[in-house]
Image: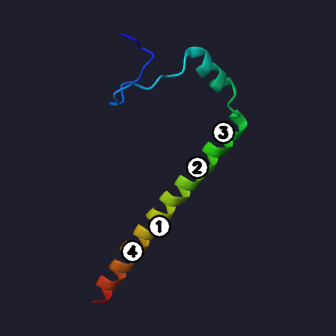
Amino acid sequence: MNGNCSTTGYKSPERLPDAAALECQWKSIDWKKAEAEVNRLQTRIARAILKINNSQRNRTSQRNRQQKHS
């Protein structure tokens, strides 16, 4: 069995890069840029979650006010 081929369901399996190619790709990553991108995405996610939580909280308080005045 050749461990260097993926089994994606195609008739001819795709060839995976060897360890040297992967090492070269790994070493060529701009880690400062990658870290900045991850931080940017984490910030976007956190803001979106806060926005969702705030809108749910506002709907709940509006519903409570409407029930009190009914």
Q: Which mark is residue 41?
A: 2
Q: Which residue is mark 1?
A: 54
Choose mark 1 or mark 2, whichever is in front: 2
For marks 2 and 4, give the CA distance: 27 Å
User: Label 1 vs label 2: CA separation?
Assistant: 20 Å
| Of callouts 4 and 3, the N-terminal one | 3
Q: Secondary structure at mark 4?
A: helix
Residue 14: % across, % down: 44, 26
Q: Earlier in the sequence, mark 2 or mark 3?
A: 3
N-terminal-most mark, 3 or 1: 3
Q: What's the distance in space between the residues labelled 3 and 1, CA to CA?
A: 28 Å
Question: What residue type is disc 1 on?
Answer: Asn
Residue at the location (64% across, 26% down)?
25
Q: Which mark is residue 15?
A: none
Q: Which residue has dot 3 on it?
A: 35
Mark 1 burial class by Cα count in 10 Å: few <14, some 14-19, many 20+? few
Q: Amino acid at mark 3?
A: Glu
Q: Residue furthest top?
A: 1
Type of amino acid at the residue the image marks with label 4: Arg
Q: In the rendering, which numbered label is found on residue 59?
A: 4
